[in-house]
Amino acid sequence: MKKLKYLAIALTLVEVIFVATLVHGVLLARESVSAYGYSPVYHVAHADNSNAPSYGPSPQATYSLDDSYLAERWGVSRIEAPQAWQITRGDRSIIVAVLDTGINKDNQDLADRVVAEVNFTDSPTSNDLYGHGTHMAGTIAAIAPECQLMNVKVADDVGRCEPSVVARGIIWAVDNGARVINISLSMRASPNLEEAVNYAWSQGAILITAAGNRGGSEPSYPAYYVNCLAVAGTNKNNSLALLSSYGDWVDVAAPGFNIYSELPQNQYGYKTGTSAAGAHVSGVAALVFSVADDSNGNGAVNDDVRWAIENSCTPIAGDGVGQGLVNAFQAVTKTTSCLLH
């Protein structure tokens, strides 16, 4: 408690008040539903438990800083995504798998962005009835506006998930073309989960994982695994967000406080936690993948993407935040500079 008290003093009063709401309720990656200020009444859609991918067209996105919703996204600007767009806005061939509570495709900004989906839960629908997965997908799409999304529902309609189910989702995502895998979830360690992570890495995918919201250095899974890029959360002062996990096992940090993004039923709202931080890095990874090449000749590109992200971070104060705050522009620039040599 002393540790949290001292951390709270160092932060702004508004953050302390906001984070205080996180201590109640069921947690997804240790996050509270009540903190999101969004509790709609949903109507369950028709059953969709197919294990086969469904593909569809994806439009060319036209996000800009003039868009009112994008102006709300302080994290997108903080990681210099708009500057990166001068080099690349992503590519339709890059698919980002969102392993989460589903993606609600009714949101106007995500319509036709989901090109494959599967439901590994006991929910009757692959749609997002919880709001978490849609929020993550919205952040990823805002940073890499020309990438495509894969909806891999591995958490149920109240945010619960099991390592074995997440492992199945990872393997399915890779086998169906995902290059980036966003796992904004936290769970116990599992041999099956680690095997799936290693398989995905060996097949050329990069796994972006939330460090968790325990406010300490205790490892979180799958973020702790060596073949995952573990992401801590920062606030608007570029400091570690109050509940973000940290430690020498964390690789990078990204905005994770009061993050604005899409929600089901064509709504928008704010979430706080390392889940949102991970989504920022997944967007950056998608941008880097669109310009990356096998610079070391080992037959893979995911290691080049990870190297570029980790070695282009902006240093920030504090221990346990890895290389620092991710920087989309620097990561893309570093990748294209390597290609020129």
Image (spheres, rainbow, N blue to C red):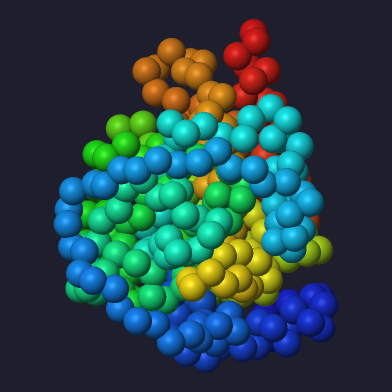
- Tell me: 100 left or right of 322: left
Residue 54 lies, in percent from the top left, at 26, 47
In the picture shown, does residue 259 fall above or below 295? below
Looking at the rendering, which quadrant does residue 278 occupy?
bottom right
| Quarter of the C terminus within the rendering | top right
Q: Residue at x 62, y 47 (%)?
A: 143
- Residue 187 drawn at (x, y percent): 36, 68
User: What is the residue that sits farthest to the bottom in this orientation?
Assistant: 24
Residue 212 lies, with reference to residue 290, above or below; the image says below
- Asked if residue 2 can be seen in this view, the reply is yes
- The reply, left or right, for residue 70 in relation to residue 198 is right
Q: Which residue is found at the position 51% from the left and 77% from the top?
A: 31
> In this view of the protein, which residue sits in the foreground, 28 or 194?
28
User: Looking at the image, is 283 positioned above or below residue 102?
Assistant: above
Residue 209 visible in the current orientation: no
Q: Residue at x 62, y 73 (%)?
A: 269
Quarter the N terminus occupies:
bottom right
* Residue found at x 44% / y 49%: 112
**Residue closer to the observer: 40 or 271:** 40
In this view, which residue lies farthest toward the top? 341
**Residue 319 percent location from the top left of the image:** 68, 58
Quarter where residue 123 is shown: bottom left
Q: How many marks?
A: 0
Which percent across, then down, holds residue 42? 39, 82
Left/right of residue 127 with respect to residue 12 in the rendered view: left
